[in-house]
Image (tube, rainbow, N blue to C red):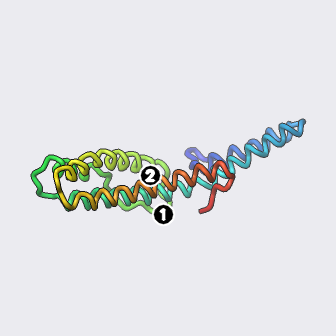
């Protein structure tokens, strides 16, 4: 047993414990079927965790790229919205680019921070559009494309969990 198991290891340990300690004690067929269903759900979650971490790493990069491009595009403009975007881009987490399968604690923290900054940046982008800036709609299109991808991934994971097809990755 590890002192600090990963999410995948934790799910695997639960599955193994259920198989080793609970399964042999079950008498009724209904209880056995229920345990098999629980194991199937846990196996799906175990397979899905790395996929979600990869998605999160990819999404952090996408959000950061959009915000940094926006800050560079509007740098030096005197409008409050442009100044706010530059400040928000400065709040983005820094450090090494995330690897293909970053540690969960690292990706979870970076994803939360990046998502927060990205969400707050939508207001200044809309303010720049309202102010007549011709470049701002392009940044908004990029943000919408990212959000469409994020929504599609969220929906696919919901449908995958509902349909038992988790773990494509």
Q: Between residues 29 and 126, which one lies in front from this camera angle?
A: 126
Residue drawn at (45%, 48%), measured in percent from left and top?
108
Q: Which mark is residue 100?
A: 1
Position in image of residue 50 (x %, y %):
56, 56
Quadrant location of residue 147? bottom left
Report crowding for label 1: few under 14, some 14 to 19, many 20 or more residues within 10 A (C-alpha). Answer: some
Position in image of residue 71 (x %, y %):
22, 57
Q: Considering the numbered disc 1 on the image, is that residue within a helix, a strand or a loop? A: loop
Q: In the displayed structure, does residue 14 sit left or right of residue 169? A: right
Quadrant location, the C terminus: bottom right
Report crowding for label 2: few under 14, some 14 to 19, many 20 or more residues within 10 A (C-alpha). Answer: some
Using the image, determine if residue 133 lies above or below residue 35: below
Asked whether residue 61 appears in the rendered view, the answer is: no
Residue drawn at (17%, 52%), measured in percent from left and top?
82
Residue drawn at (34%, 56%), measured in percent from left and top?
143
Which residue has dot 2 on it? 107
Residue drawn at (24%, 58%), measured in percent from left and top?
70
Q: CA separation, marks 2 and 1?
A: 11 Å
Q: Considering the numbered disc 2 on the image, is that residue within a helix, a strand or a loop? A: helix
Asked whether residue 85 appears in the rendered view, the answer is: yes
Q: Which mark is residue 61?
A: none
Position in image of residue 79 (x %, y %):
12, 50
Q: In the displayed structure, does residue 77 sit left or right of residue 160? A: left
Using the image, determine if residue 116 lies above or below residue 57: above
Q: Earlier in the sequence, mark 2 or mark 1?
A: 1
Using the image, determine if residue 24 lies above or below residue 69: above
């Amino acid at each position: 047993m590890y002192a600090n198991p990963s999410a995948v290891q934790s799910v695997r340990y639960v599955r193994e414990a259920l198989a080793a300690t609970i399964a042999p004690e079950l008498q009724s067929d209904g209880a056995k079927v229920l345990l098999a269903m629980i194991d199937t759900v846990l196996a799906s979650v175990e397979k899905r965790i790395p996929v979600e971490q990869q998605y999160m790493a990819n999404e952090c990069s996408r959000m950061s790229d959009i915000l940094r491009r926006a800050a560079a595009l509007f740098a030096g403009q005197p409008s409050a919205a442009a100044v706010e975007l530059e400040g928000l881009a400065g709040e983005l987490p820094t450090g090494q680019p995330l690897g293909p399968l970053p540690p969960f604690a690292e990706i979870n923290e970076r994803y939360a921070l990046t998502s927060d900054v990205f969400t707050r940046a939508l207001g200044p982008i809309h303010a720049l559009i309202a102010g007549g800036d011709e470049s701002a709609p392009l940044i908004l299109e990029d943000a919408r494309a990212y959000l469409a991808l994020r929504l599609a991934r969220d929906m696919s994971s919901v449908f995958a969990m509902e349909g038992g097809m988790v773990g494509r990755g």
